[in-house]
Image (cartoon, helix red, strand yellow):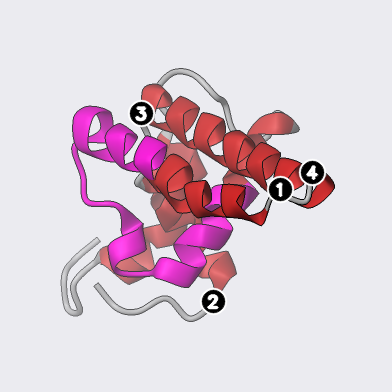
Amino acid sequence: MKPFESFEAFYPYYLSEHRNGTCRVLHVCGSLTVLALVATAVVGRRPMLLLWCPLVGYGAAWIGHFLFEKNRPATFTYPAWSFMGDFVMLKDVLIGRVPLLGTLPPSFYAEQIKPYVEAPGSET
């Protein structure tokens, strides 16, 4: 697989790694909980709450990947873009652009990631 040149190119790949609805639910729950922790830490002046953010956010996401999606989280290969992807996917779920439940259709990612996942010289 060739490296992604931009977040816009990476995001369809990110979605392809989140085909399972339960995995997406766990990501959304983890991301919303992280946002609530950050807000509570700031408003309540309790910075120690921020220590829970990685555990809550990544814990929920990784359970989704290991138990339901059965893949390796993209965070291990693309940490910054995966972090951005978590919140872009959250936004897309909240505005209805990406379905929360059910299997994600290939139209969300298949054609867009083809240039990155096909081996050089392979036929299409």
| Among the 4 quarters of the image, the one containing residue 105 | top left
Secondary structure category for the residue under label 1: helix
Mark 3–mark 4 Cα distance, whole angstroms, equals 36 Å
Residue at image mark 4: 44
Label 1 crowd (10 A; few <14 / some 14-19 / many >=20):
some
Q: Position of residue 33 (x, y in %)?
A: 59, 35
Structural crowding at the residue carrying mark 3, measured as other residues with C-alpha within 10 Å and reported as few (<14), some (14–19) or many (≥20): many
Residue on which the image places disc 1: 41
Q: Is residue 93 above or below residue 77?
A: above
Q: Which of the two marks, 1 or 3, is nearer to us in this view?
A: 1
Of 123 and 68, the residue lying toward us? 68
Q: Quadrant of residue 67?
A: top left
Instruction: Provide the major secondary structure of the magenta segment.
Output: helix
Q: Give the secondary structure at mark 3.
A: loop
Q: Secondary structure at mark 4?
A: loop
Look at label 2 and name its amino acid. Answer: Ser
Query: As shown in the figure, which amino acid type bears the numbered disc 4?
Result: Gly
Where does the magenta region start and end? Answer: 59-88
Determine which residue is flagged by label 2: 6
Q: Is residue 47 left or right of residue 113?
A: right
Cα distance, mark 2 to mark 4? 37 Å
